[in-house]
Amino acid sequence: MKTETAAEQHPAKGERQHRLASSAYWVEAVKKWLWIIVRFVLIFGISFVILYPILLKLSISFKNMNDLYDPTVIWVPRTLTLENFKLVFTAMNYPSILMNTMFLSSVVMILQTITCVLAGYGFARIKFRGSNLLFAGVVFTILVPSQTIMIPLYLNFKNFDLFGIIELFRGSPINLINTYWPFIISSMLGMGVKTGLYVYIFRQFFRGIPREIEEAAYVDGAGYFTTFRKVILPNAIPSMVTVMLFSFVWQWNDSFFTNMYLNEPKVMSSMMSSSGYAIATHLSGGGAAALSLTQDPFFMSMMMNTSVLMAILPLIILYLFVQRHFVESVERSGLVG
Amino acid sequence: MKIKKLSLEQKNRYYGLYFILPWFAGFLLLFLVPLIASFRYSMSKLEVTNEGFTLDFIGFANFREALFSHESYVRTLTESVMDIAVNTPLIIIFSLFFAVILNQKFRGRVLARAIFFLPVILASGIIASIESGDLMQSVVKSANDTTGGGLSVMKNLELTIMLIESGMSPILVEYLMGAVSRIYEIVSQSGVQILIFLAGLQSISPSLYEAAKIEGSTGYEAFWKITFPMISPLILTNLVYTIIDSFISDQTSRLVVDTAFKSFNFGLSAAMSWMYFAVIALVLWVTTALVSRKVFYQD
């Protein structure tokens, strides 16, 4: 805003000389350039702060054992090695963990988006006495920390039963802990990670779409759901992309629910919290040499860094592809109301 | 004829309910019922057995235990609240400032934006918690400090002295210096906030700025007279978001989880989480009550 002064246009020649002579022009020019420099320094500095841990991890993960104890090596390792990656790859059982996480995050993402887009649309359109109270429920789900309802949810899924129907057939309720069902059920019913926020985003967005569009569709003989599918939904794609991204990423990073519902580290985020242990058990098969390695805190730290890097690598790759879309879609998604 | 028209309108009012149904089922089964159950647990002693669990009603004993005899609950809770009181204003100011900068046109804006939103993806949950306790990173950091960074500490000190001598209050200086040294923490928590602010800035009509420029306003004036009031509803939104977000990932919540799943004291954990929720609600209520009076709504 500040920088878009009229000085950017090319004035006529005579006018230009006149301008150069006036001191106001120079003051303006200096101000402009000063701001550009300050801005550059600020952005560069903060970008560095953000990228620093990733760069550090990259540097550490390529290091060799000898480099760890070499005081002259700080950033660039003397001998580049892929050993760390190989070790973590096998110790973490990386391919299967990656597949599991991908599967879980994608399923949760799709189910959550569907439920939330429906609910958001519904909340934008209902208008009767008490409808505000219903929406207050959504806000309430955002406000109440998941820790408050964690124990009943856990016990609920441990002895899962739907109004006694399952017990009628099997004789006992099912134990859904350590399966993906708790995630699928809660995301299908719109109660997953931060789902209230998604409903809120969609409601804000649909409130901006005029009712006349729907009415035109009704006049043409479309039902409520046909109208929704054919008229409303295509308009909602930007905000759907936003919600899908958020939902995917937050499910990927969520360690609270994954640690609660899964006993074994099956997915990336719960693997992360126990990766040190996993690497230690993997190495301890190798005899005395390996044992000394696992007792070396530097080595274990190097392994941890490598494993964190490998855990976020898929996300970073994903982000590189969608980040442009991400920013634009948030701008258009009606997040702002 | 009149009655028929009314009924259609009524129908139009209620059809939205069909769309809400799946969410509402989840709200009842996975939120409201567990919430009530959790309240019951907080009032009782819960024993997990093979067939399920048993409940013994013991009144407020769990609450009393958390408040008066638990070794760290009260301290952790006050620390969490203090942290939030310190960090939230910083996060809001920081993210608004950088949203304004990222909204300007300059070369490399796309790249800068991409980097600034990286914390949305990376700095949540487990990754951040591993980072804070990492040995290797602190070693490299200290190596950096001894090679060249030793000076930076001195500079910081000098700046502090200079600011205090120039007449700023020591409390404010300390706060600012604390903010500088915790910059990573602040940056990593403000990704979503920058995103929301940026989206808000895009929705301000450029004609407002144009009119202001014709009237002879500077960029500084335009910020305080146009940008700030127009963005103020989002400041409230971001405030609420920041508070909730920082409460979710702090020490107290970890303590609550550990009490439940490490020491298997479910009743105590439920009582802790209820008091925790009460504190969050109180903090949110106070901030919204204070801020919403200043918020400017265009319509």
Image (cartoon, rainbow, N blue to C red):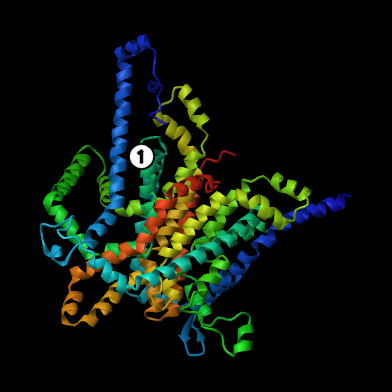
Q: Amino acid at mark 1?
A: Gly
Work out which residue is located at the far top of the displayed protein and give it: A14
Apparent side of residue A207 relative to residue A271 in the rendered image (left or right): right
Task: Please provide percent x and percent y for residue A256.
Answer: 42, 69
SS class, disc 1:
loop
Apparent side of residue B36 relative to residue A60 in the rendered image (left or right): right
Residue drawn at point x = 51 percent, y = 74 percent: A182
Above or below residue B40? Residue A167 is below
The 10 Å Cα crowd at callout 1, few under 14, some 14 to 19, many 20 or more, is: few
Residue placed under numbered mark 1 in the picture: B108
Q: Nearer the viewer, residue B84 or B215?
A: B215
Work out which residue is located at the far right of the displayed protein and give it: B1
Q: Nearer the viewer, residue B82 or A108?
A: A108
Task: Please provide percent x and percent y for residue A131.
Answer: 66, 57
Q: Is residue B167 visible?
A: yes
Q: Is residue B38 visible?
A: no
Q: Chain of mark 1?
A: B
Q: Nearer the viewer, residue A39 or A221?
A: A221
Above or below residue B270? Residue A318 is above
Residue drawn at point x = 51 percent, y = 90 percent: B51
Q: How many marks?
A: 1
The image quarter containing residue A114 is bottom right
The image quarter containing residue A165 is bottom right
Task: Please provide percent x and percent y for residue B200.
Answer: 49, 42
Quadrant in the picture for the N terminus of chain A: top left
Apparent side of residue A64 relative to residue B83 in the rendered image (left or right): left
Work out which residue is located at the far left of the displayed protein and give it: A71
Task: Please provide percent x and percent y for residue A255.
Answer: 40, 68
Above or below residue B273? Residue A43 is above
